[in-house]
Image (tube, rainbow, N blue to C red):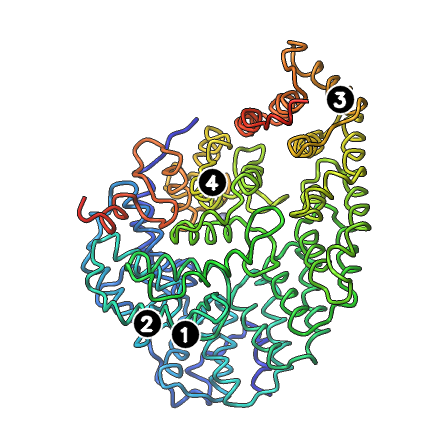
Amino acid sequence: MASLSSEGEDWRAWVPLSSRPEFAAVTPLPQDDGPSPVVAIAYRDDFRETMDYFRSLYSSRELSPRSLLLTSLAISFNPANYTVWHFRRQVLEALDADLNDELEFTERVAKGNAKNYQLWHHRRWVAEKLGSDAACGELEFTGKIFCLDAKNYHAWSHRQWVLHALGVWENELDYCTQLLEEDIFNNSAWNQRYFVITKSPLLGGLKAMRDSEVDYAIEAIGTNPENESPWRYLRGLYNDENDGWLNDARVPCACLRVLKAKRNLKFALSTLLDLVCLGFKPNQEIRDAITSLRTSHSGEVGSDSDLAKSICSILGHEDPMRANYWTWRSGRLPQAAEV
Amino acid sequence: MGELAGDKHVKYILCVEKKKDSFESVVMEHLRLNGAYWGLTTLDLLGKLDTVDSNEVVSWILQCQHESGGFGGNIGHDPHLLYTLSAVQVLALFDKLDVLDLNKVTDYIRSLQNEDGSFSGDVWGEVDTRFSYCAICCLAILKRLDLINVEKAVRYIVSCKTLDGGFGCTPGAESHAGQIFCCVGALAITGSLHHVDKDLLGWWLCERQVKSGGLNGRPEKLADVCYSWWVLSSLIMIDRVHWIDKEKLIKFILDCQDTENGGISDRPDDAVDVFHTYFGVAGLSLLEYPGVKAIDPAYALPVDVVNRIFFGRC
Ligand SMILES: [Zn+2]
């Protein structure tokens, strides 16, 4: 489509639409803001002109190459204008346009507008039409976005759709590992990892993956015990399976290692608290570690007679911003937790 | 700690409405109805809604309605649930819901529910739990929730629950405070909060408070004033708001004010906009800041407006 070449147009060399031959017969149509506008709109000249011409072609629903060009121009000014995108899809359908060009177009728009809802919705529409041919390209496309922002919510949502709808799961767990090597704090990548191990038809599901994933999460915890994501991931591996959670000796061991290092204790302590509340009986080593923390944090040694209460009180000191939360936890400990 | 510069914010909003030649107003053309909701709700929370001519606003809103029954973001724009909700909310602010052709609007909303209970935002079919909230909140305000399959709508939202107790945009998506507000709000409105693991979600939400006192929307992200609304409203709906440090959050929001020209920004020293001004003031409202009217955490409308809708005149 030759008309698309002007999307890379140099704006300093803007040719007014009124002087372009292909728009000679179009009467521009200004935005109607009602009789007495709630919000008066003023436009930059080139933007206003583009939108006036767009409105004109849109109101007559002219599905033509020059309409496609206008939507490109309008999108380059304001990619958030959803009406323009809607019209563009109608034009693309009517012209039976080559949608591979459209992939290129959206990729250009994505540079600098990667958090735009319309862009992603449009990309999805194109990929859906192209079907499985688009699968690998879509994974690559989201990969490029993640190089710039590895937590882009839209891109993750798009990628999950691609995996689900187009079934290209082969390398996804490795991809998660790669992203987590780059940034172990990337919660989006942890979420994607959970998505893969629970949903990929190739891996056998959560139960089959649990054992190795517990190791993976615990290793991540070992290097950064302050990292919220692997702790929640670890708990998620035993979602709704408290028996398994209580009986996996690797979990309290991981907590103990953090306690002994005496730094970044919050998630290790809260995990132990969770376990104790469910009936876990900590060994002497863990009890000693907690006791030693208690004495270093509160002046009144022995004021907390039970372990879970001690944990809550240490957490209240460790995490003063959420002191009320830890006090609340302390106030609703089950009888069984009074070990 | 500074104080809320309420009068300045009122001036700022009234001035944005009339501002010429600003790029902000140009890029907002298509979502002017959202802008009207943010601005007008802020004015109402600050007790200054009467400075606006309601008849003008109402007649403009009606011109944004499409023949399908849905509302576009401005005159001549395509209809979408996002703007339909804003239209209904603004009409509710002005006590003008009776200007609506009820069947027309509700038919539009009903037509967007999918087989699995989810909602599309418009005829183009994008699915997101945000749209579930828009549909449910709208229909509840219009007292026509019976028109959709609420049970399926709830089931879909519950299927978007994540391992940390939060919710994402679709099943399997990451927890995000904005999506959590939408899901918890929709569950609250439909009386389905028993599906929420309140303790787990409450802890995740209060972990969003960072050293500066502000709230972020996901782990390891920057604090932002708009999350004061999304996180706080969710915490209130599940009755866990006392788990955060309110004083520190109030200070963070107040630090994001432009005390000279009015308006609130996403974080201290950034440029202000209407969106963050609304979320900042709404956040302070949830924190019971003096001089700000109370806002309802589920309907995102002043409490007196919600009472008027459901309990007659106040
Ligand atoms: Zn924000």
Q: Earlier in the sequence, mark 4 or mark 2?
A: 2
Looking at the rendering, in which quadrant would you find the C terminus of chain A?
A: top right
Disc 4 to disc 2, C-alpha distance: 33 Å
Task: Respond whether the residues carrying marks 4 and 1 are from the same subunit.
Answer: no
Q: Is residue B227 left or right of residue B137?
A: right
In this view, the mark in front (2 or 1) = 2
**Residue B5 placement (x, y as % from top left):** 35, 35
4 and 1 marks in contact (CB < 8 Å)? no
Q: In the rendered image, which quarter is residue A201 located in?
A: bottom right
Q: Is residue A223 left or right of residue B18?
A: right
Instruction: Please state which of residues A23 and A208 is positioned toward the viewer in this rendering.
Output: A208
Q: Amino acid at mark 1?
A: Met
**Residue with the mark numbered 1:** A51
Disc 3 to disc 2, C-alpha distance: 62 Å
In this view, the mark in front (4 or 3) = 3
Disc 4 to disc 1, C-alpha distance: 42 Å
Q: Earlier in the sequence, mark 1 or mark 3?
A: 1
**Residue with the mark numbered 2:** B107
| Label 1 Cα crowd, 10 Å radius (few <14 / some 14-19 / many 20+) | many
Q: Amino acid at mark 4?
A: Leu
Q: Residue at x 52, y 86 (%)?
A: A93
**Residue with the mark numbered 3:** A287
Kind of element beneath mark 4 = helix
Q: Amino acid at mark 3?
A: Arg
**Residue with the mark numbered 4:** B235
In the rendered image of this protein, does residue A118 appear above or below residue A293?
A: below
| Label 3 Cα crowd, 10 Å radius (few <14 / some 14-19 / many 20+) | some
Instruction: Please state which of residues A236 and A144 is positioned toward the viewer in this rendering.
Output: A236
Q: Is residue A100 left or right of residue B49?
A: right
Kind of element beneath mark 3 = helix
Q: In the rendered image, which quarter is residue A44 located in?
A: bottom left
